[in-house]
Image: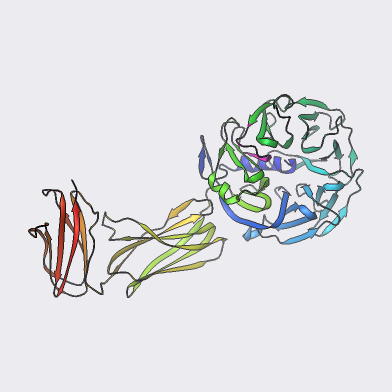
Amino acid sequence: MKISHKLVRRTFLLLSPLLLGITTRGCIELYFALLCVALGGDHRIINASGFTENTVTQIYVGNEGDVWFTEDGGGPDYCTFVDFLSIPGANSLNAVTLYGQDSIGNIIVGTNGTLVRVVNGDEINFIPNPTTVNLNDICQDLDLIMGQVLSPNVVTVGDSGTVMKSTDHGLTWSVLSFPDLTDLRTCELRGDYILVGGSSPFMYQSEDCGLTWEVINILENSFSDGPPGFNAIYFVDDSVGYFGGSFGVMGKTTDGGNSWNALFVPGFEAINDLFFISPDSGVAVGTNGIVRFTADGGITWEEDPVVTKLIGGKNINKISAIDEVTGRIIGDSLHIVFSTDSSIIPVELISLTASVNGNSVTLNWSTATELNNLGFEVERRVGSKQSTVGKWEKVAFVDGHGTTTERHNYNFVDANLIGGQYLYRLKQIDFNGQYEYSDIVEVELLPVKYALFQNYPNPFNPSTIIEYSLPQYGFVTLIVYDMLGREIATLVNEEKPIGSYEVEFDAIGLTSGIYFYRLQAGNFIQTQKMILIK
C-alpha cells in the first residue's frame, strides 16, 4: 500500500458515488466500467503515481528498472504509454511519489537502495542514499479531500528496519532510528504521524515524525502457524483504517491505529492493496487475481466473477486512482483502467437499419463513441412486432472497438433465409458483462418457394401456430385431419396473395393424440404432423 496513492484514492472515492462493478454488495451498488484492458507481455507493473488537481503525467514503475508514462491517465486510449525509460542499475522499482512540482518531479524507490528523481519524463537524477537495502514503499503528507501535497515531508521504508525521512520533497534524506530489523513493506504519513508495517507481527507508530516509536502488537498471538506480515495500510479517515497481509489476513482499526481487530478474507492469497469507498465498503486485491468486495466493514467478503475471470489469476499489485472518476488495476502483465462515472454511456448507437436482398437481410449500424465495448450480439426473431410467439435467438457476434471517440460502422449479413417477417436487435455487451439492447428493426422477405412449417409449440395444449409461405397468388386450403383421415378443421379456404402467413389452430374440444395438417396451393401439396397432449 503506497500512501501517495492511498490518500489520493480517498479523494477519488469521496467524489465518486459508485465504484467497481454493477454488482450489488449489501446496500452498496458497485459500478465498474472498463475503459481498457491490456493483458499479456512480460511487464510487471508494481506501482503508479497518484494525482493532484493539476496532474497531467501519470508514471508507472515496475521490474527491471522500467518506468512508463501516460498523459491524462493514458489519453483517449487510456492504456497507451506515451514514453518509456529505464533506470540504469535498478532491478525492481517499488514505489513512486505523487506528481508534484515540475522542478521536483517524481521520487522513485526500489531494490538495492534505488533512490532517483525523474523530471519531465526523461531526466534521471540519482539521489545520494545512505543505505543500499531494498526500499519498498514511499509515503507523503496529503490532503484527504483535495489530493494536494500538504508538506514537503516524505518517508520511505525498506528492509532491515530502514526508515528514511525527507523534509524537502525527497531531494535529501536522513535515516531515522528504528527499534527493529524487520523488513518494512508499507507506510502512512499524516502530519507528524507515521505508521509502518512489514514482515513482523507488529506495527510501529510515531507521533513525532520518527523521533520515537511505539510498538503495536497485532498479529503475534492470532495465528497458530506463525504471524503473517503487512503489505498494505489504508486509512479511510482519521479513525477508520485497514491493513492487508499474507494468507488473506486483514485488520481494522476504529481509533486511528491504536488498536486493531483481525479480519479474514476467503482464501489464502496475499492482500497487496486496499481501496475503500466508505468506512464500510471497499475492495481488497492481491495475488492470483484476488478481487474481494465488502459492504459491512470487512466482516464478509465476496468475489466478483466477471472481474476475476477477466484478470485470469494474474497477480494484482495495486488498485489506485488516475483522477476523480478514473482508476486502474495494475499487476503482472496486467493494466486495467476503469471509470466510476455511472453517467457515462458506454456506447452511443446512432443508427440501426435492415435491408433485404433476395433471401438475405443486411444489418448496418453505427456508433458515435464507444466505451468499454466488447461487441454486439445480433439477435433474430421470426414474426412481426405484433406477434407474441417465437423467441429471440443469437445468430452472430460482432467485435466492438473497446473505447474510442471516433465513429465506427458495422454490418452483418443474415443469409439463406426463407420468406417471412423477421425482427432483429443488437445486444451491446461491455467487457464487464453489462449489456443493453438496441431498438428493434423489422423486415419482410417475399417467399421464393412454397413452404409449410412445423407448428409451434409442438407438442401443444390447447393451441398452436402454423406458418406457411406462398411465392405466387392462388387459391389455398389448409386442413387438419385426425389419424383416421377424418377432416377436423378447415383453417384456410380462400385466395391468397404472395407472402408468408401464420394461423392459430385451437384444439380445445379435441382429445390427446396425433393430428396432421395439409396445405394445398395449386400443384403444391405438403403435410406435417403435430401432437396434442392434454
Q: Is residue 406 left or right of residue 132?
A: left
Magenta residue check for 323:
no
Q: Is residue 122 left or right of residue 74?
A: right
The residue under the point 15% across, 49% down is 512
In the figure, 325 relative to 438: above or below? above
- The image shows residue 207 at horizontal and vertical percentages of 81, 28
How many numbered marks, from 0 up?
Answer: 0
Task: Tell me where residue 414 sits by quadrant.
Answer: bottom left
In the figure, 347 relative to 28: above or below? below
Magenta residue check for 273:
yes
- The image shows residue 365 at horizontal and vertical percentages of 44, 66
Q: Is residue 117 visible?
A: yes
Q: Is residue 445 left or right of residue 487?
A: right
Q: Which residues are magenta?
A: 264-277
- The image shows residue 276 at horizontal and vertical percentages of 63, 38
The residue under the point 77% across, 47% down is 94
Say which of 18 and 487 sits in front: 487
Location of the N terminus by quadrant is top right
- The image shows residue 243 at horizontal and vertical percentages of 69, 34
